[in-house]
Image (tube, grey):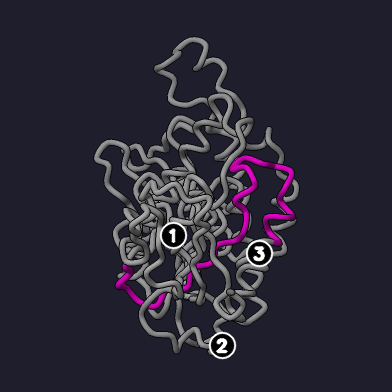
């Protein structure tokens, strides 16, 4: 793995689960790998901006471990009480702004020695705006990051140059398309918004839990859609196993950072130092055997709709696997989770019966 070769690092949003990005940077640093460009969305932009401002993973981790709920979430009581539905957001923007300034400082994109792009959405036009591009490098990094973290309804929009901006995840939570056109070499994209587990009833009760769960589903569906049949440069997708952690859990910081580190280290080890030798496509891949439990299968046909090249219904109306051995990229196989009776499973090809 040649540290001199350029590559782009893309960091997704996902609430506090994005603290896993600190572990990602630590794993890269240990291998002497320095991104030539970091593209961040939401909390991914915050971690990316701290890195671009020359903070180390160790300093980021120490600061993250000190953050408490009150440092970010303070209810906008006056706005909610007096303006009600006209209130700009449920929480005040000042605590978030202060946290961002503390991590990033008072610099513009032109002042940075490392290349950074921050993904935001223009609230009025709906356009994706990537701060740090030529013509958009005059802005304060802290303003752009605050805008990128401004989840609509949760935090108020951030005004920059007279226009209102919100979370870039509204348009593209894992901004790999622009990264492909603006960066050099392969892309390492880190997605902390995956939703590969089902939530229990108590995890979806109340406004906040319902909103968060809906957001998780939207972000994952969006990412799957944009990466399906990926035709861009080689893309290494890292998905730290943080699905079980709430987007706004303040007591799991160490676990999140460790998950990001381990997932990145494992992925890079799987590539066996071939980051700059891989061809177009998504990595890492694995060979799996797809199995159907006939007793569980009710013949609903959902798997056929989602993966017609893999399944069909046999004469009995049961799901039948057309091509049992599959080579999966990290995003494939959603039909396993989406089977309503859990009739579909996979095993590593070499151990499957």
- Determine if residue 138 is in view: no
Label 1: how many Cα within 10 Å (few below 14, some 14–19, many 20+):
many
Label 2: how many Cα within 10 Å (few below 14, some 14–19, many 20+):
few
Residue at the spot 44% in from the left edge and 73% down from the top edge: 326
Dominant secondary structure (helix, strand or loop) of the stretch shown in magenta: loop
Indicate the position of residue 135 as horizontal and vertical percent values.
Answer: 29, 59
| Element at label 3 | helix
Q: Nearer the viewer, residue 317 or 302?
A: 317
Residue at the spot 58% in from the left edge and 53% down from the top edge: 18
Asked where in the image residue 324 lies, by quadrant, the reply is bottom left
Residue on which disc 1 sits: 109
Residue on which disc 3 sits: 23
Front disc: 2 or 3: 2
The Cα atoms of the two marked residues, 2 and 3, are separated by 19 Å
Residue on which disc 2 sits: 273
- Residue range in magenta is 229-258
């Amino acid at each position: 793995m040649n540290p001199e070769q350029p590559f782009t690092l893309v960091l997704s949003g996902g609430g506090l689960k994005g603290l896993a990005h600190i572990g990602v940077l630590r794993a890269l640093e240990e291998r002497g790998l320095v991104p030539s460009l970091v593209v961040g969305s939401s909390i991914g932009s915050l971690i990316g901006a701290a890195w671009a401002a020359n903070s180390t993973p160790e300093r980021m981790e120490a600061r993250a471990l000190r953050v408490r709920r009150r440092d970010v979430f303070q209810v906008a009581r006056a706005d909610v009480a007096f303006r009600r539905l006209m209130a700009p957001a449920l929480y005040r923007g000042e605590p978030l702004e202060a946290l961002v300034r503390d991590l990033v400082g008072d610099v513009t994109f032109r002042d940075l020695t490392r290349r950074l792009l921050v993904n935001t959405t223009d609230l009025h036009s709906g356009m994706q705006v990537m701060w740090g591009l030529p013509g958009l490098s005059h802005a304060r990094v802290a303003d752009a990051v605050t805008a990128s973290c401004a989840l609509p309804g949760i935090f108020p929009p951030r005004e920059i140059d007279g226009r209102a901006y919100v979370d870039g995840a509204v348009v593209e939570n894992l901004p790999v398309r622009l990264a492909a056109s603006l960066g050099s070499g392969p892309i390492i994209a880190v997605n902390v918004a995956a939703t590969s587990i089902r939530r229990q009833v108590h995890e979806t009760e109340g406004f906040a839990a319902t909103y968060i769960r809906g957001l998780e589903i939207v972000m994952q569906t969006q990412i799957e859609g944009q990466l399906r049949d990926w035709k861009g440069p080689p893309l290494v997708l890292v998905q730290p196993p943080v699905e079980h952690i709430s987007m706004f859990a303040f007591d799991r910081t160490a676990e999140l950072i460790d998950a990001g580190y381990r997932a990145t280290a494992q992925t890079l080890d799987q590539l066996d130092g071939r980051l700059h030798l891989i061809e177009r496509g998504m990595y890492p891949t694995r060979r799996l055997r797809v199995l159907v439990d006939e007793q569980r299968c009710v013949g609903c046909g959902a798997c056929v709709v989602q993966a017609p090249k893999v399944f069909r219904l046999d004469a009995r109306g049961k799901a039948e696997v057309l091509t049992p051995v599959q080579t999966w990229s990290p995003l494939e196989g959603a039909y396993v989770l989406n089977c309503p009776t859990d009739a579909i499973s996979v095993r590593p090809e070499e151990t499957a019966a």
